[in-house]
Image: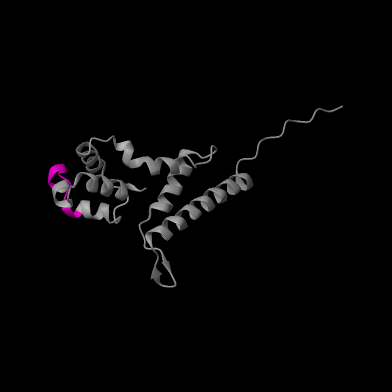
Amino acid sequence: MDLADKILELMNEQGITKYRLSKETGVSYTGLTKILSRQTKHPQVDSLQAIASFFNKPTDYFLEQENDQQNQVPEWATPKDLADIKKILEEDQPVLFDGVPITDENRQRAMDILTGLLWEARDLNKKTYGRKKKAAPKEEE
């Protein structure tokens, strides 16, 4: 369940409209609409905190899926590796197949596959072109 699903589920459970949530949290109606329609994947921290506070939930509740994806990061990854992969994956360009935009579900599947491929390529690159360990000098007999 992604961020939009979690917010929509809480709204439905409590009978809250987008308009009311916008007014009560101070998040603009347009901004909230973009979050709920998944146009905005990573809302501003203050917006997320306001929504979390309104529903009496910790912000981590809304970021759970993001944290799950971070658990898939290889143990050898450096902070620079994380930043590079995040930058590549967060470019908000439409994903097309044969000139037609794909569904959100298929986009997520493609992103998951791409994430795995990027980590694999980064690992191979480090093994192939990484720093070579200096061999211990051979002792003469």
Q: Residue at left 54%, top 53%? A: 117
Q: Quadrant of residue 68?
A: top left
- In reply to whether residue 17 is colored magenta, the answer given is no
Q: Main secondary structure of the magenta part?
A: helix
Classify residue 83 as left or right of residue 37. Answer: right
Residue numbers of the magenta segment: 23-30
Could you tell me residue 95's position as x and y percent? 40, 63
* Residue 51 place in picture, x, y as percent: 22, 42
Q: Is residue 24 magenta?
A: yes
| Above or below: residue 34 compared with residue 75 | below
Q: Quadrant of residue 47?
A: top left
Which sits in the foreground, 19 or 126?
19
Q: Nearer the viewer, residue 82 or 10?
A: 10
Q: Residue at x 37, y 40 (%)?
A: 64
Quarter of the C terminus within the rendering: top right
Q: Is residue 32 above or below residue 95?
A: above
Q: Between residue 116 and residue 133, name the one nearer to us.
A: 116
